[in-house]
Image (tube, helix red, strand yellow):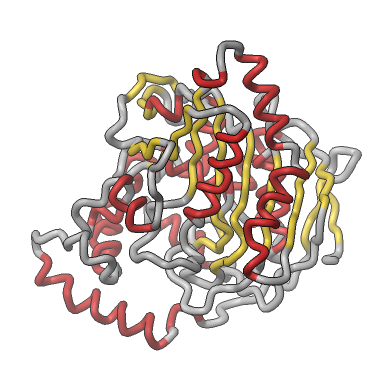
Amino acid sequence: MTDHLIYQNDATVWIERGDYNNEKFDRLDAVIDKSGFLGNLEDAWEAKGGTKDEFAIAIKPNIMTASVHDDETSVYTCPKAVEHLIGRIHEAGYHRVAVVESQNVYNYAYTGRTVPAVAQMCGYSGCNYDIVDLTDDIQKDVDYGGCLGKGTAGERWHCADYRISFAKNKTHWQSVYTGCLKNVYGCFPEWDKMKHYHGTPQEWWAVTILSLELDPVHFGFLDAWVSGDGLTGHVWDPTPKQTLTWIASPNIFALDWVAGEKMGLNPVKSPMIAQALGAWGPIKILRQGPMDVYPSWDNIAGFVPPIINTVEKFHRIVRVITRASTTPGDPRFKPVSRLQIFFELPQELMRLGQKMGVFQARWEKFEDQVFDMTPDGGVCPMQRP
């Protein structure tokens, strides 16, 4: 267990829920204000010193899982919400803001998928902030320690004075569900993450913890206004859930724990949360807001993540499977031409399976208890609200 000034702190998590879609940004403002985000930012600036114009802020949303533009997406963080947050940051006097992300394994199948290009497709304007591709950014030599050791990190994330993880609320076949912790995995600069950050001993959940300890996240927001569930919730959901919720906390470990509870899960079913619990230990969490489970929510079957994580150790096989299972996206990103003739049929079958709803079958609905971090530092069962 390692000492950490943020993740080992007892924390409050704020949950703000709306009733109608036109309340979206009113409720986002409410969670920004109730969570004390701007005060937290002010404290960090005062501790750093210097002017507000020099104070570097990096926001990591979920961008690169996007394959098509969708105004009401369940796949990537709402760009308008990120820009709304940036507007509040600007109003407070901070102007050195970057939205950051790195390229990913979609490069197996598509060309031209730089972060600025995909961000533009999603709806980011880049007005009064930078959009930074951490894969192409200046690389800083770092020592992650542990199983990863020496490597590199993109400068605009690593050297930021204040880091924000603004994740999307959705299930995930690697990690059961994904939130602000796993979102930071997307800051690793190598685009072929299967090759560089998967396998024994550098499993993705272990290296993500190392990254979080090297470059701490100071605040987290979770976009759960529209959410993706089911087997393919993290990349495609034909029937997204209108969960109409925002979640915020200065401790993203606590935030993600609560995010799991809102799905009706025991959070430690996620290898990401289990790794975090092992690294930082249990903490007290004060939940401010509605804790009822999202209605009609479909979780990932328990047998899926172990299978996926085992298969992903075999990089060359996964590379072929990933490309074969990739369905057509935005036409501005052309398919990789090499051997494409062999991948057209399986890609067409995947598209057909999506239309038929094959991947949205109700694989399993968890009915076990969720767990709570209790005041005495232990972990004990708690019945769902």
115 vs 251, left or right, is left
Residue 287, position as x, y percentages in the image = 82, 50
Q: Nearer the viewer, residue 272 or 186?
A: 186
Percent from the top left, x then y, of residue 110?
22, 58
> Residue 45 is drawn in which quadrant?
top right
The image quadrant where one finds the C terminus is: bottom right
Q: Residue at position x 46%, y 69% from top? A: 232
Compared to 366, does 174 lie above or below? Answer: above
Specify the quadrant that holds the N terminus.
top right
Which residue is pictured at 50% across the width and 68% down the height? 72
The quadrant holding residue 49 is top right
Outermost residue toward the bottom in this view: 356
Which x, y percent locates residue 79? 47, 53
155 relative position to 349: left or right: right
Instruction: Name the residue rendered at 23%, 76% in the picture.
Output: 346
Q: Vertical placement of 342 versus 212: above or below?
A: below
Asked whether 143 or 37 is in front, the reply is 37
Q: Residue 102 falls in which quadrant of the image? A: top left
Judge from the rendering whether residue 258 lies leftward or rightward of residue 113; answer left or right. Answer: right
Q: How many marks?
A: 0
Residue at the far top in the pictured view: 50
Q: Residue at x 61, y 52 (%)?
A: 222
- Where residue 336 sits: x, y (%)? 15, 59
